[in-house]
Image (tube, grey):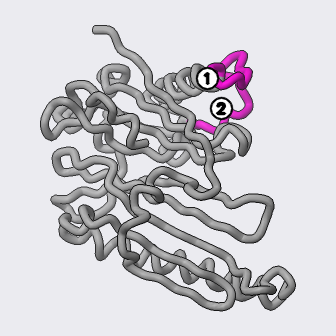
Amino acid sequence: MRTSYYVRAGAFLIAVAIPALASAADEKPAFAVKTRSIEATVIIADDLRTFPGLFEDLLPEGRREVAKWQRTADTDRKNTPDNFKDGRRYTFDRSYTQRSATGRYVSVLRSDYFEMGGAHPNSTVNTILWDAEAKKRVSIRPLFTETADGGPTLSRMVKNIRAALAVVKRKNDVPVDNPDTDEALGAVEPKLLGIGAVALAPSTDTAKSSGLIFYYPPYAVGSYVEGAYQAFIPWTLFKDDLSPAGVALFSGERPKGDEDKD
């Protein structure tokens, strides 16, 4: 069987920092704050409320993040009041959107946008893997036979990710000599906490996943002007590393057009 990579660099737009924020723009905020220092919102997509316990898990996290930014804004306003003249204030927006629902797992994109009066806004993205049966957050570790830091599984995964990222960088006229030694791509490390934010990709097979999608916000694997990157790694590239639980979860191919949701 022929396998392939799909990687795309997302252009960074000031108005819409991350696609997930755009898709959630019409959602009513689950929580919002507006003070003289900051305007902040937390949006949780409606379809995430259908999974028992998930909304109740996400909302407190979002509120805590807003509180952290509010403390920062209040402190900065006290120390640098000129930066807050004429009604200026910090902006922070967090959105939680569903990337996929695969068997017992729900992949959630957590996208943050923040404006602190600098040269440009900034954004970041992370993921949450929710076990709908156990009603808790989990990692991809049980899907593989071995996931030690620097071990063979994650080392092979990192090699595939770096190679894929190199392809799109070159298409964008960003020079990459050797993906394995490139300084920017070196940020992708063979560690569960260093390999990148990961989500399960949908599949043409019902209740299955076609592979893993890795998300890298601006600055993560390149300069700010390069924008954000996403890397899709088909399950066929890591099938030999799967545990019985992983073998049961992965099959099929990525649906046509699914990459447009990244």
Q: Residue at x 56, y 21 (%)?
A: 163
Label 1 environment density (alpha carbons within 10 Å; few <14, some 14–19, many ≥20): many
Single out the residue that lies furthest toward the top: 1
Q: Is residue 157 magenta?
A: no
Q: Is residue 171 magenta?
A: yes
User: x and y percent of residue 184 in the render?
Assistant: 70, 34
User: x and y percent of residue 219 in the render?
Assistant: 68, 46
Most frequent secondary structure within the magenta stretch: loop
Q: Is residue 220 above or below residue 90?
A: above
**Label disc, if present, on residue 185 of the rendered structure:** 2
For the residues labelled 2 and 1, say whether their Cβ atoms are less than 8 Å apart.
Answer: yes
Corner quadrant of residue 200 = top left
Horizontal side, residue 218 vs residue 2: left or right: right
Corner quadrant of residue 245 = top left
Q: Which residues are magenta?
A: 170-189
Mark closer to the observer (2, 1) = 1
User: x and y percent of residue 224 in the render?
Assistant: 72, 45
Residue marked by disc 1: 166
Horizontal side, residue 162 vs residue 111: left or right: right
Q: Is residue 182 above or below residue 81?
A: above
Q: Earlier in the sequence, mark 2 or mark 1?
A: 1
